[in-house]
Image: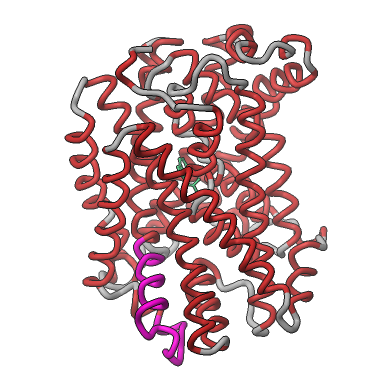
Amino acid sequence: MSSNRGNFSSRIGFILAAAGSAVGLGNIWRFPYLAGQNGGAAFLLIYLICIFLLCFPIMVGEIAIGRAAGSDAMGSYTKLGNKRWGYLGLFGILAGVFILSFYNVVAGWAFGYFLEISFGDLLSEGDFGSFFGAYVNDISDNLWFSLGFMILTALIVSRGIQKGVEAANKIMMPSLYVILVALIIYSLTLPNAMAGVKFYLIPELSEIKVQTIFDGLKQAFFSLSLGMGALITYGSYVSKQQNVVSSAAVISIADSSVAFLAGLMVFPLVFSQNMSPTEGPALVFMVLPEVFSDMGPILGRIVGGGFFLLLCFAALTSTISLLEVPTTYLVDQKKLKRTTVVWGLAILIFIIGLPSMMSQGMIPALNQLPFYQGRDFLTFIADMCDLTLTIGGCLMCIFITYQWKVKNMDNELAIGNAGYMSSFLRKYLHFTISYVCPVLLGILSILIILDKFFGLSNIF
Ligand code: TRP
């Protein structure tokens, strides 16, 4: 590994950065609304099964590839495989660019809500549903807030791995846990909170439908930042003394615990207001402000501001990782200067995000795509990215099994982990990476394509 690429300074630095990549809007915005739409506890169950059965092995595989090759996503596949496999890395890098394009729009909403709840008078609005509808349609606010968010991300990434990525995560990740736990304690004290807890924790097995499985899988992949080379990239900055398997375990647990805790905060809040948990993407933007507004002007500002600040922190640690992936690629492969690359990419990705930003009503043609069952452009891009992740994960398993070979992965994993070769985990990883993951992910990816374009889940 060339010394000027930089490295994470320590194991904890890497774990926090990777957990920061994983913990994001996916955990606090998307997980609760998907759980709300898919029967609460039933969704939680499927999600956790996907995390530990399918996602954990893929995370180990990705980090191992990155550390073994010491290069960006495309460079790593090329080095350990060949040029053709390299395109898989490139495909992932492009997926990351598109994820960041819409992710930054949603992060901009969160940023705007934080400012307007803490310092403006958003909480005195009467109808939060129509407020949100108007808000996402207001081009000037959206433009400035998401531009602000992109600039913040670029500022951090341009400072490099240790001073930028690692340092930012070391502050934001612990703060995020503190805010989250404080909000949970508060929400559990509200009247009718227990109905929310029950909805979230006691599974009704009849609620498990095909859609639950599709949503659980895509959410698990997205949430752990898998399938597009983000962890290959971070893995390439990991030192050889580190134990990859145990780091991956800690990252998976840190991420799923934040999703779990976010649900434990959101559902008691929603049920305490006798509101419906099935609101969809607008859940935290429409339902929660109602709750905060009922708390009175001062407490509402503190708790509501705290919540949206939490959302911003989570989003920022993820946008950092999303921008780092194409940055590492251009720095490694094209030998360009880091700062130039970061700002160039930030502007480009911001522009790619404009149609998503304007698809919430501003431009009717983008709001109802005829070829996509009348859904909006942001949803379309997000769904296509989800699909890329599961396909990317499936192909990565095929790469390890048939090209790089499991034995080479073993050798890499044994570095920094003396007991690995004789462990049960080794057998588990072989079995899942060679058989379970590629087969299940292949089948599910095809079914998800059929569902998205032809509405398969209506048939079941
Ligand atoms: N995992 C993040 C979330 O849950 C999103 C994210 C960041 C991501 N980096 C990624 C998703 C890379 C896929 C790939 O919000």
Say which quadrant the N terminus sits in.
Answer: top left
- The question of residue 177 being in magenta is answered with no
Label total for image: 0
Which of the 4 image quadrants contains residue 312? bottom left
Q: Position of residue 369 (x, y in %)?
A: 35, 62
The image shows residue 257, relative to residue 148, as above or below, that is above
User: Residue 404, percent across and down?
Assistant: 53, 10
Q: Could you tell me which residue is drawn at 38 percent across and 63 percent down?
A: 376
- The answer to whether 228 appears left or right of 459 in the picture is left
Q: Viewed as shown, does residue 256 lie left or right of 162? A: right
Magenta stretch secondary structure, dominant: helix
Q: Vertically, is 90 above or below 449?
A: above
Quarter in which the C terminus is drawn: bottom right
Which residue is painted at 64% across and 50% down in the image?
A: 216
Residue drawn at (78%, 75%) of the image: 194
Dividing the picture into quadrants, the one containing residue 442 is top right
Q: Position of residue 52 (x, y in %)?
A: 71, 37
**Residue shown at 71% from the left, 64% from the top:** 39
Region of the chain picked out in magenta, as a range = 108-131
State the residue in front, 63 or 211.
Answer: 63
The reply to whether the magenta stretch includes residue 129 is yes
Image coords of residue 56 (percent x, y) = 65, 33
Q: Tell me if 31 is positioned left or right of 301 in this view.
A: right
Q: Quadrant of residue 145?
A: bottom left
Position of residue 24 relative to residue 369, above or below, is: above
Which colouring convention does the figure follow?
secondary structure
Q: In this orientation, which residue lies closer to the viewer: 143 or 219?
A: 143
